[in-house]
Image: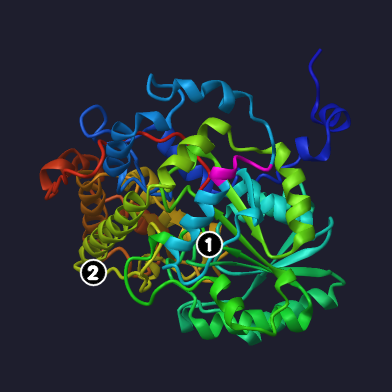
Amino acid sequence: MGFTLSNQQQLLSKIATGNGHGENSPYFDGWKAYDSDPFHPTKNPNGVIQMGLAENQMCFDLIQEWILNNPEASICTAAGVNEFKDIAIFQDYHGLPEFRNSVANFMGKVRGNRVTFDADRIVMSGGATGAHEMIAFCLADPGDAFLVPVPYYPGFDRDLGWRTGVQLIPVACDSSNNFKVTRAALEAAYEKAQKANIRVKGLLITNPSNPLGTVLDRDTLISLVTFINEKKIHLVCDEIYAATVFSQPSFISIAEIIEENIGCNRNLIHIVYSLSKDMGFPGFRVGIVYSYNDAVVNCARKMSSFGLVSTQTQHLIASMLSDNEFVKRFIAQSAKRLKTRHMRFTMGLAQVSTNCLKSNGGLFVWMDLRRLLKEQTFEAEMVLWRTIIHEVKLNVSPGSSFHCPEPGWFRVCFANMDDKTMEVALTRIRTFVLQNKEAIVPRKSNRLWHSNLRLSFQSRRMDDTMMSPCMMSPHTPIPQSPLVRAT
């Protein structure tokens, strides 16, 4: 006898039967489309190219070179097997001392050594996902809220709210000032929560921004610190893209601001970090909570028992990040290669009058396709997005999934592929835009507009590789088909 939905709801928890994970978002639907038809340069050249995954594959040749030159860093090699027993049985949730020291030093180097970090405040977690949930558990109760400037990473709804019961309240930002957060917008969001009898416990920011790829300037950061001090709420700073900044203005960490601001209540400041973006290690699940609040550090460390980083991974990371020459070279090369890729991609789009928000960090661009919308609505954005997914065969992420208040913006990731695949993707976008110059004009007939959006893509995709400049670089990896991952 089968179970009905009603039976399931009675037998299982609300978390198990609800959809709080948010997997039904277009953000995740795009990954499913890629997963069912992944691009491969020879085996499936007409497949979907994954441009919805913010993954950094630009410097794996440097990583591989280091591993080959340092076999003792792994306990699973002949050179490192003598460490196997001690590493395998270690289970202190504080983490290996050498791991915490190396991560603290790396965080300082990424920030230009303008600030130092205390290894005793490093709390590890299972990626930034686990770190965000951990900090939410420490700072808020079910029903409490965090203010979050829009647009923001779609996974935040899951990471901070699914199991904690915490709410996210959007802070209005728009393209009129390049989506910069203002004090007026913060006050408006805070007042709205107050009127709704929602207790605001904190403000969550991402710097550099995901999905914008921009950095917060010093004045804005000071304004944010002033705001949270006045309201006596927490400031959680997601800085997981800190080392992806490739040009001016430089990245300024919240750690630098509070060093300069004596009047700041440090107990309200918390940083989330990971090695998923800066080093390109999402599979290692290295997440970090760094808090200036002793009680939060103590609580988070106990909670970390539910999402520890394996000691084998800690051992490898500690060895790698302790190599100062390697770290220096890696940071410099990563920035250089990201700058080159970003420039090539944005210039290619500009040649067909397709603009992106000016940015200098992250692994993506915030692409403006508003002129391709039949009408300025989110329904029209979904129509355009489905065409790009199913006809152009590119998984890009629609702005609405990032809670963007304006339809027509898309996040496009460019660092998770080699140069040749990037050129194929760029060719597809450029061809689509050029073929639909006339189709973007609003028509009386929706049927005509929909048909025009599909202009000859079935036959055109066969020639993608031939049309592409195909600039294969010796330092970019052979394209892999990453499984669906949250990033």
User: Magenta stretch containing residue 98, yes or no?
Assistant: yes
Please rate how many residues cluster around mark 2, counting C-alpha atoms within 10 Å: few if below 14, some from 14 to 19, many from 20: few
Question: Which of 285 and 434 lies nearest the eye of the viewer?
Answer: 285
Is residue 414 in sight in this rendering? no
Q: In the rendered structure, find residue 38 and report the number of the disc placed on it.
A: none
CA gap between label 2 and label 1 equals 29 Å
- Pinpoint residue 10: horizontal percent, then vertical percent: 88, 31
Q: Split into 4 quadrants, where in the image is the N terminus?
A: top right
Please rate how many residues cluster around mark 1, counting C-alpha atoms within 10 Å: few if below 14, some from 14 to 19, many from 20: many
Question: Which of 159 and 379 lies nearest the eye of the viewer?
Answer: 159
Q: Is residue 322 left or right of residue 164?
A: left
Relative height, residue 154 to residue 284 (above, below): below
Q: Look at mark 2 in the image and give the residue it sits on.
A: 350
Q: Which residue does the image show at 45% across and 34% down from the upper left?
A: 483
Label 2 SS: helix
Q: From the viewer's perspective, is the residue at label 2 or at label 1 nearer?
A: 1
Label 1 SS: loop
Q: In the rendered structure, find residue 239 and report the number of the disc placed on it.
A: 1
- Pinpoint residue 174: horizontal percent, then vertical percent: 52, 77
Looking at the rendering, which quadrant does residue 97 occupy?
top right
Q: Which residue does the image show at 43% across and 47% down from the upper left?
A: 322
> Mark 2 or mark 1: which comes first in sequence?
1
- Pinpoint residue 220: horizontal percent, then vertical percent: 55, 82
Q: How is the image coloured?
A: rainbow
Q: Which residue does the image show at 62% across and 46% down from the upper left?
A: 124
User: Magenta stretch containing residue 408, yes or no?
Assistant: no
Relative height, residue 15 to residue 144 (above, below): above
Callout 1 amino acid: Glu
The residue range painted magenta reads 94-99
Relative height, residue 9 to residue 349 (above, below): above
